[in-house]
Amino acid sequence: MALDYRPRVNTPGRWAGIAAVLLLHALVLWALVSGLARQVVERVREPIEMAIITERREPPPPPPPPPPELKPPTPPREVRVTERAPVPPPAPLPPVVPPPDVRPPAAPAPVVQAIVQERAPERAPERPAESRPAVAPVPAPAPAPAVSRQEVALVCPGYKDILQSALAGVVDRVGIDGDVTVQLVVRGQEVVDVKALSGPREYFRPVVGAVRRFRCSAGAGDAQVTTTLTVGFKLE
C-alpha cells in the first residue's frame, strides 16, 4: 500500500474542535483559580463512618480447682504406761470374840394363894307349871295330780321354699356371714308370735317377716307349740 503524502485541505470542523478544547482548559483553569474545584473536591470527600466491631470472645474457662491439700498424717500419740506400785492388801482384822452369853437367873415365880370360899347353892324359885294348848296335827299335803304328757307334732310344709324366695338377695345386700336363730309360737294352724334370739341384727327383720309367712299345723284344736329355727347366711 502506498502512502499518500499529499497535503490535506483544512476543514472548518477541525478548527471547532480545537476551539472547544481550548475553552475547556480555560474553564478548568478559572475553576481552580476561583476555588470552585476545591468545593467540588470537598463535597466528594464525604466523611466515611467507620464502625469497629469487636469480635465476641468466649470467656476463658475457669481455672481448674487447686488440688486438695493433703495434710500430713498425724503421728501416733505415745501412750505412756506408768506402773503403779502394788497396793498391799489390808491387814486382816482381829477375830471378833462374841461376849459370853450370860443369862440372868430367872426370877422365882410369885406364889399366888387363892382363897376359895364355898357357898351353899341357892335354890331358884319354883315357877308354876305353864299350861300349853294342844296343837292339832298338820294334815299331810295331798299328792299332786299326775300330769299327762302329750306330744304335739309341728308340721310346716314348704317352709324352705318360703325362706329362699323371701330372703333372696338379702345376703348380698347385707354382706355378713352368720346364723340367725328365731323362736316361733304356733297355735292351731297359725304362727302367732316370732322373736329373734341371736345372730346378726341386720337379718332379724327379713327373717322374722319370712317366718310369719309359714303355714304350720300344731295338731287338732288350739294346741300351742313353741320351737326354734336357725337360718344360716353365707357369702359365696
Image (tube, rainbow, N blue to C red):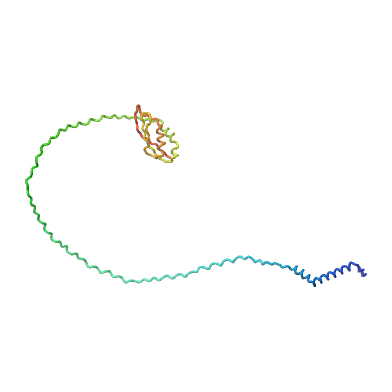
75 vs 121, nearest the viewer:
121
How many numbered discs sit on the rendered protein?
0
Q: Residue 226: name its quadrant.
A: top left
- Left or right of 96 in this view: 180: right
Return the x and y of residue 183 as percentages of the image width and height: 36, 35
Q: Residue furthest front?
A: 34
Question: Foreground residue, 148 or 144?
Answer: 144
Residue 212 in percent (x, y) is at 40, 33
Instruction: Give residue 189's position: percent from left, percent from top.
Output: 37, 28
**Nearer to us in this view, 9 or 86:** 9
Tell me where residue 79 sits by quadrant: bottom left
Q: Which residue is situated farthest in the top direction here?
A: 220
In the rendered structure, the answer to whether residue 122 lies left or right of residue 89 reads left
Residue 195 image-quadrant placement: top left
| Near-viewer residue (118 or 61) | 118
Q: Position of residue 106 (x, y in %)?
A: 13, 59
**Quarter that holds the N terminus:** bottom right
Q: Is residue 24 left or right of residue 43?
A: right
Q: Quadrant of the C terminus?
A: top left
